[in-house]
Amino acid sequence: MATSYPWFPFYAADWTLSVIGMSAVQRGIYISLLAYQWANGHAPAEREQCARIAGAHPMQEDDWLAVRAKFHIDGDRMVNLDRKSTRLNSSHSQQSRMPSSA
């Protein structure tokens, strides 16, 4: 399920802590896949698809392993559970602000 928001919350402190030890390339791949997941509800779990999405083709094995570790794999999909819960909370928040029709 994709979100209706064209943006996602970005918490600088959380991001900084979550990417400690990642190279600049890995960080770029990671943020690209988070954005893709936000728009599409999930990212593909296939390395070559992720490389094309992130503009990192071909993707090195160590880059793939570092980024993939940030996601939960479910068949052919990957989901960053922190980002998924943020999206669900945002959707719930948006619905609770919508006026009810009476």
Image (spheres, rainbow, N blue to C red):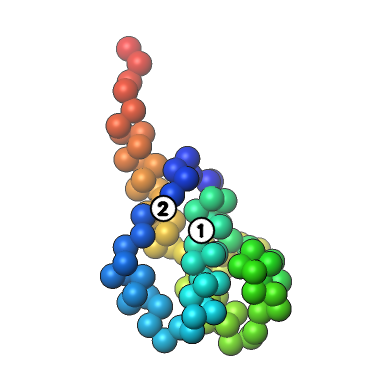
Q: Residues within 10 Å of mark 2 (few under 14, many from 20)?
A: some
Q: Amino acid at mark 1?
A: Ala
Residue 2 is situated, as x and y percent measured from the top left of the image, at 53, 46
Q: Nearer the viewer, residue 45 or 30?
A: 30
Q: Closer to the N terminus: mark 1 or mark 2? A: 2
Where 85 sits versus 31, above or below? above
What residue is disc 2 on? 8
Labelled pair 1, 2 in contact (Cβ < 8 Å): yes
Which of the 4 quarters of the picture holds residue 78? Answer: bottom right
Determine which of the numbered discs, if any, sits on residue 48 in the image: none
What's the residue at 64%, 74% (across, down)? Answer: 56
Q: Amino acid at mark 2?
A: Phe
Q: Residue at x 54, y 50 (%)?
A: 39
Q: Percent x, y for residue 13?
A: 28, 70
Residue at (51% x, 58% y) in the render: 35
Q: Is residue 99 left or right of residue 46?
A: left
Residue 40, image x and y in percent? 57, 51
Quadrant assignment for the C terminus = top left
Mark 1 closeness class: few <14, some 14–19, many ≥20 residues within 10 Å: some
Q: Secondary structure at mark 2?
A: loop
Considering only vertical position in the picture, is 51 above or below 11? below
The residue under the point 34% across, 75% down is 16
Q: What residue is disc 1 on?
A: 35
Residue 69 visible? The answer is: no
Using the rendered image of the protein, determine whether residue 58 is visible from the camera's viewpoint: yes
